[in-house]
Image: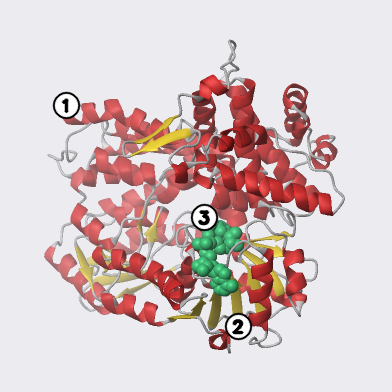
Amino acid sequence: MSHAITTELGSDGILVATMNLPGRPMNVLADALVQGLSELPAKMADPAVKGMILTSGKADFCAGADLDRLVTWTKPEEPFEGSMALKKILRALETQGKPVVAALNGHALGGGFEIALACHARIALDDPGLKLGQPEVKLGLLPGGGGTQRLLRLVGLQQAMQICGEGADIPVAKARAMGLLVDVARDRDELVAKARAWIAANPKAAQPWDQPKFKIPGGDSRAPATVQMLAIAPSVAAAKSWGNYPAITHIMSCLFEGGLLDFDNACVVESRYFAACVMSREARNMVNTLWFQLNAIKKGASRPQGIARSQVKKLGVLGAGMMGGGIAYVSARAGIEVVLLDTTQEAADRGKAYGQGLLDKAVKKGRSTPEKRDALLARIKATTSYDDLQGCDLVVEAVFEDRAIKAEVTKKAEARLGADKVFASNTSTLPITGLAQASGRPQHFIGLHFFSPVDKMPLVEIIVGKQTSDATLAQAFDYVLQIGKTPIVVNDSRGFYTSRVFGTYVMEGIAMLKEGVHPRSIEVAGLQAGMPMPPLALQDEVSLSLGLHVAEQTKKDLAAEGKAYAEPAGMAVVRQLCEIGRVGKKAGQGFYDYDAAGKRLWPGLTAMFPVAAEQPPQRELIDRLLFAQANEAARCLDEQVLRSVADGNIGSIFGWGFAPFHGGALQFVDAMGTRAFVARARELAARYGARFEPAAGLVKRAETNAPLGG
Ligand code: NAD
């Protein structure tokens, strides 16, 4: 008998089954829980039982599949059978004749949502933070517990495709409007009371698809409206995914085929596609990085051990510009008291107004309330006085990217800070060890590199200077988690990790232009490679003049250190465009022309960089864009700029959107094997230049085809 589900029979004949997986913070579909579910139909056969409420003893209802198990499957038969076994249990639960209500007291995601769908009715707590849905596609998978087929039969093909194909959370209000919930409740007591009432009112519940005259809402896969939608769905999906995510295709096929079959046969089809997803390279990559490595990072894999956890109660932010305003907002959102300082009160107030703007929008959309907004804003004090920094646990500097100004604010702030408090710089280009020279206690000085826009970007790159102490790193790490972001930890270096590797992507695209590759082919290759934005468009966003400025600063800095500077292959092109005033999007002209109608590649580009008669295949362009980044990431590992493979992978996906289906810049190498990577990198080096010469660590590993990770 499983201890993962406890049952209690009430005097009204209603069995309350409570999922509470021992030893785990969340309910997941581990063996013990599945075993517990399998025992429920027999318990319901007891004539004293009139119906059942399925709920959870944890904060969530059930968070989904047990991915530890999933990665042990090596043959497609295993996921197929695993999925069929779960379906058999859920099918028994929904066909035993008595009503079952899912009382959703917290998140029901993935397999957890599938369990809820196999109940005859669902009631959820009316909590705007409660998440429902099928996020499997985000890990390259699809719901394998009958979820695709139950959703198809509950909400129709189009909505089922959206829910499973996009994997977005479904808020409670929307789920209710779609008919996925029969009711909502204020609290746990009301939840159970309403579930009891539903059972009393529906003594003979059966699923709609088990009723004789059942029809799929909106029609089956042959219905004219559905046929029309199906004709365009693959191209709509491909426009976003460029065919890089087989799970999306499998989800569409599974729903289309399922819409032609009876429920049980449709479930077999779903299990076949589920197995195909599980065995796919893409799912392996994504589960490896976006599940295992991400969880390890969040649990503190990159944090120094043996140092007590810290919490920031009061934060100082210097510079209330675009970044400072954002940092103040996300910190206040996490309950931290914030002092936001600038040179004038007006500038400081403007920084605070950034948060106000975001909150006003949230209130308008019903995602927050005026009271919550006002309470959050009351935590931000906009000021020009350094004395307000007294009592801060941490100060983050986000003033102009200028060494002298940064040095000045460091000194002024440190004069008001406790001796053991941390000072962090949000510089994007200046090495931390150099900035720490202005500090009276460089062991407490660190880099906290936020990304723009701060409220949306999930990553913070923590940069450890030469003298930064472990205690400082631990405090910075805890703060990043406290504000709900993901930290990666890197050692100091020019461009750190993210800007350095991201730069190779953009520069490679620009180098192609100079060689005579058609600009449109370059841009399409960027998207085909799985990057969120093509390289030329991206350089326009960042601005060509900024790129040039950073390159020239780097050249000067290196000369001062007596080091040589190798100019990236695309920089000459950037200079040429800057010379004619095409400095990027902010000027309305760069690689693209910008106007009210949108943007178009500048027609003059092909005159300036004539298109070669013979164009390379797209595969060559895609490889160049990906290999340039992966090789540079491997160099960062060699040079110990990167401290772990997990940080390298997560940093690449969360920092600059490296193709998620490859599982990150280093997993890209491991997925193909170091030997194959080195061989192809050498081919590219022979054709395009030394930047493709594989990193030394890769060459060494390639001897035995050893991976970079674990
Ligand atoms: P910004 O120009 O929008 O804001 C800078 C703010 O600092 C201004 O409000 C300015 O008045 C204030 N300031 C200048 N001197 C000051 C002083 N002596 N004391 C107090 N305040 C002062 O710039 P930003 O884009 O917010 O960038 C700030 C820092 O963050 C820079 O170091 C930049 O490199 C870094 N950064 C920027 C981005 C980005 O995408 N913009 C991303 C990561 C890091």
Q: Nearer the viewer, mark 1 or mark 3?
A: 1
Q: Mark 1 points at which residue?
A: 224
Tell me the CA gap for discs 2 and 3: 39 Å
Residue 311 in view: yes
Residue 30 location in percent, x, y?
51, 58
Q: Which amino acid does label 1 sit on?
A: Pro
State left or right for residue 576 relative to residue 139: right
451 or 57: nearer the viewer = 451
State left or right for residue 520 relative to residue 55: right
Q: Mark 2 points at which residue?
A: 393
Q: List the single residue furthest toward the top.
A: 613
- Return the mark for residue 596: none
Residue 652 location in percent, x, y?
61, 48
Q: Is mark 2 on a helix, strand or loop?
A: loop
76 or 533: nearer the viewer = 533
Residue 670 in view: no
Q: What element carries label 3?
A: loop
Q: Earlier in the sequence, mark 2 or mark 3?
A: 3
Tell me the CA gap for discs 1 and 3: 39 Å
Q: In which quarter of the image is ligand 1?
A: bottom right
